[in-house]
């Protein structure tokens, strides 16, 4: 069992919780290789995907995970802007609560949306990304992918490069890495750093080339042009020149080091096509792990071994 | 009707008194302050164990009328003021429509005459519609009773416009009240830029967004000679700028709010929209600097920036909810709990920052516990306990940053012009 009923931020998970999720995901990953990929584990349980922001990979990943566990999955897609007309998030949550679902996955444009749902609903809440705050299942699947590729998590040095201040992925991955004994290094121009990077507990660097030789993982973030109020760098060309991962930079990584990206990629900006498609890129592996990790999260939150047949 | 307030501790820094005395009131005016007074036929009110202060004023409130009566009205907001121990308020013009003409000021004055239980001093807009584009009809508003001018809510964006406004306002000898915020730096931030914005994933506004405009308004006050009152200062550097300006003799005054004095950003641990206000809660060091400014006289006034909102507006995502906390009903209790009961300041200092200082800042009529002054008196029960629950509020709104607090001391009675606005803790009228 996990220590928390919800996974809203990485604070909800202990180091043991993380290990349990990753170990459980390993057994589900094996199921995902079978010809018949379905388990009866969560039969009769209702899982709602409440997506207030456009999402393809995360929503599909959760949806496939719930189907593989035989849960009844329901998708709800809506606009985030409850400001002018339409229902408030609180009312949507109350409406859903009245329909007795067991788990809600929520993605929302604004930080704190999962907490608001948890205030009015009895079921488990999984944060599928809230504003620029956190995206914990992404961090979990990233840890899973790293552990699978490099055999360990403790002691790894992970360089997270790019749009840190607009990244909920970094918001969860940094504390996740710290919990498992790895060292996060955030690398970005100062305009893409959060106000107080020290609060995150990561090492801070502004020069990617200096850091490259020390990294076990180079994790590129998507530049979120849509969230920036002012263009935080002069041009895509200059960004790629200073912070983009390309073949020359990949050569400067240690030979065992791997390249990751949470997707969707801006090819040619934060990552060049030849790196993205290279054998050292784990990008599709991340997507694959996502399903197994989300199955593990659902399984463990909805009662674990008590809920029925184990994996 | 004559009243004899018997045996209370009468405290007034301006009158230079702090002793147990009687006060006689006749026809709405204080006729005597002294020991063992007699007034045949007067109603005698036992004030033993009470503290009597000259009528407290809150020079920064939002009464929301006209246009947003679902949040608050002049009636409900002034009842909240009486409940909190205030005998007067100055209300901001960012209503719907904006109070930017003489006729709109007259509306507020007339509604106050009909419905208010404490005195209401309207503040007019600096620019038409608070758009920052063109001067509002300042002279007409002065003629109708506006006491000061402000584009509070966002401030005057351009320095050039602010300069024209101060040049123009100077001739009426009323203050320009500055909401200090450089919008291009604040950049849509909903909390202080720093630890909390980083931890909570919320857009932050830097302290500099305020400080840059504080420096600008002080410089423009020097240039134009206009009296400038700086609203709701929240940062250490803002206070330092005012301290220096006052030392140079600039005609500048300033206020701080109870929430910035008694809370800091560390209070924001969940997405509680009652803690979303503009300017945002700052750091503990900023908070300490505000208290220091209060103690050394840099800060002229405690004003609440009472900003009532309906529950459905505050029960939104943090980034979508409107800014503001209510303040009228908790201010005096907070000051007693945090400053007086702890011995940091005495009641005489409270009269400086909650009566005389704010009145002088806005040029409002002085109130003293002396014969000849109107009987505007705040009577405090310093030992009463206040449990701040939603039900406790008289305001229409419940969005208090201090909801759930347990406070010490509250106003038991309030006299406005010799008439009860609050009696035994209950609002009259």
Image (cartoon, rainbow, N blue to C red):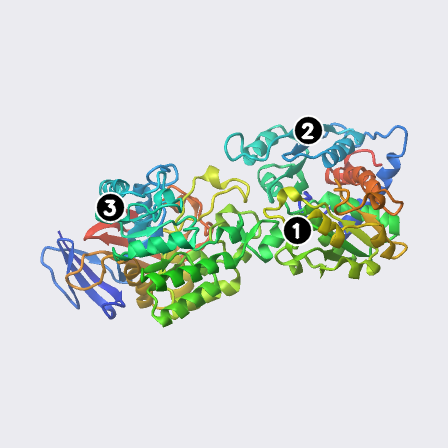
- As measured in the structure, the alpha-carbon distance from the residue carrying label 3 to the one carrying label 2 is 59 Å
| Residue B424 at x, y percent in the picture | 28, 51
User: SS at mark 3?
Assistant: helix
Answer yes or no: are tags 3 and 2 on the same subunit. Answer: no
Q: Which residue is mark 3?
A: B140
Number of residues whose C-alpha sits closer than 10 Å to that of mark 2, classed few (under 14), some (14–19) or many (20 or more):
some
- SS state under label 1: loop
The image shows residue A198, relative to residue B311, as above or below, that is below
Determine which residue is flagged by label 2. A75
Residue in the image at 35% along x and 37% along y:
B69
Image coordinates of residue A25 in percent, x first then y, are 82, 41
Q: Is residue B70 above or below residue B273?
A: above
Residue identifier under label 1: A234
Chain letter of the residue carrying label 2: A
Q: Residue at x 48, y 65 (%)?
A: B237
Q: Nearer the viewer, mark 2 or mark 1?
A: 1
């Amino acid at each position: 069992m996990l220590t928390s009923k919800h996974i809203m931020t990485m604070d909800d998970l202990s180091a043991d919780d993380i290990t349990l999720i990753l170990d459980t995901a390993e057994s589900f990953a094996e199921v995902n290789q079978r010809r018949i990929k379905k388990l009866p584990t969560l039969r009769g349980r209702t899982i709602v995907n409440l997506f207030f922001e456009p999402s393809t990979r995360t929503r599909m990943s959760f949806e496939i995970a719930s189907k593989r566990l035989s849960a009844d999955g329901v998708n709800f897609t809506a606009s985030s802007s409850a400001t002018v007309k339409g229902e408030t998030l609180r009312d949507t949550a109350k409406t859903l609560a009245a329909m007795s679902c067991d788990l809600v996955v929520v993605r929302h444009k604004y930080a704190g949306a999962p907490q608001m749902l948890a205030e009015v609903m009895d079921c488990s809440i999984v944060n599928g990304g809230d504003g620029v705050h956190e995206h914990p299942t992404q961090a979990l699947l990233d840890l899973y992918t790293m552990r699978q590729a490099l055999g360990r998590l403790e002691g790894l040095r992970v360089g997270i490069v790019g749009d840190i201040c607009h990244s909920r992925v970094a918001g969860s991955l940094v504390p996740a890495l710290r919990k498992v004994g790895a060292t996060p290094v955030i690398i970005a121009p100062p305009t893409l750093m959060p106000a107080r990077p020290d609060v995150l507990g990561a090492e801070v660097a502004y020069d990617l080339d200096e850091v490259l030789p020390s990294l076990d993982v180079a994790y590129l973030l998507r530049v979120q042009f849509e969230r920036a109020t002012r263009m935080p760098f002069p041009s895509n060309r200059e960004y790629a020149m200073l912070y983009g991962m390309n073949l020359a930079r990949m050569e400067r990584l240690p030979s065992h080091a791997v390249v990751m990206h949470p997707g969707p990629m801006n090819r040619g900006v934060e990552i060049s096509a030849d790196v993205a498609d290279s054998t050292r890129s784990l990008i599709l592996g991340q997507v694959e792990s996502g399903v197994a990790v989300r199955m593990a999260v659902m399984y463990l939150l909805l009662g674990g071994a008590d809920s029925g047949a184990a994996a | 009707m004559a009243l004899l307030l018997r045996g209370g501790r009468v405290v007034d820094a301006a009158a230079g008194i702090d002793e147990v005395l009687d006060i006689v009131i006749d026809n709405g005016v204080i006729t005597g302050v002294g020991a063992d007074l007699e007034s045949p036929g007067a109603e005698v009110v036992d004030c033993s164990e009470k503290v009597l202060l000259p009528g407290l004023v809150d020079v920064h409130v939002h009464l929301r009328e006209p246009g947003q009566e679902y949040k608050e009205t002049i009636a409900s907001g002034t009842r909240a003021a009486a409940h909190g121990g205030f005998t007067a308020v100055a209300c901001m013009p960012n209503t719907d429509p904006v109070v930017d003409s003489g006729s709109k000021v007259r509306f507020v004055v007339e509604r106050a005459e009909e419905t208010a239980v404490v005195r209401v001093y309207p503040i007019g807009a600096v620019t038409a519609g608070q758009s920052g584009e063109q001067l509002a009809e300042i002279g007409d508003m002065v003629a109708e009773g506006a006491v000061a001018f402000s584009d509070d809510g966002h401030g005057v964006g351009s320095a050039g416009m602010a300069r024209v406004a101060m040049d123009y306002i100077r001739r009426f000898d009323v203050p320009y009240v500055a909401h200090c915020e450089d919008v291009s730096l604040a950049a849509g931030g909903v909390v202080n830029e720093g630890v909390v914005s980083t931890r909570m994933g919320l857009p932050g506004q830097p302290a500099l967004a305020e400080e840059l405009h504080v420096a600008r308004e002080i410089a423009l006050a020097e240039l134009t000679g206009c009296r400038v009152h700086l609203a709701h200062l929240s940062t250490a550097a803002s206070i330092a700028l005012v301290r220096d300006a006052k030392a140079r003799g600039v005609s500048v005054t300033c206020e701080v709010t109870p929430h910035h004095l008694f809370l800091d950003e560390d209070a924001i641990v969940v997405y509680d929209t009652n803690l979303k206000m503009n300017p945002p809660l700052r750091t503990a060091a900023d908070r300490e600097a505000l208290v220091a400014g209060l103690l050394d006289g840099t800060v002229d006034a405690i004003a609440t920036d009472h900003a009532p909102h309906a529950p459905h507006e505050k029960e939104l995502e943090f980034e979508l909810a409107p800014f503001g906390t209510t303040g009228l009903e908790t201010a005096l209790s907070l000051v007693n709990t945090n400053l007086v009961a702890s011995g940091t300041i005495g009641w005489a200092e409270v009269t400086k920052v909650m009566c005389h200082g704010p009145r002088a800042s806005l040029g409002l009529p002085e109130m003293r516990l002396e014969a000849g002054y109107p009987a505007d008196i705040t009577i405090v029960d310093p030992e009463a306990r206040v449990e701040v629950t939603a039900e406790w509020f008289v305001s229409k709104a419940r969005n208090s940053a201090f909801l759930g607090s347990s406070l010490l001391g509250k106003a038991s009675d309030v006299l406005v012009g010799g008439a009860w606005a609050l009696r035994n803790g209950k609002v009259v009228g």
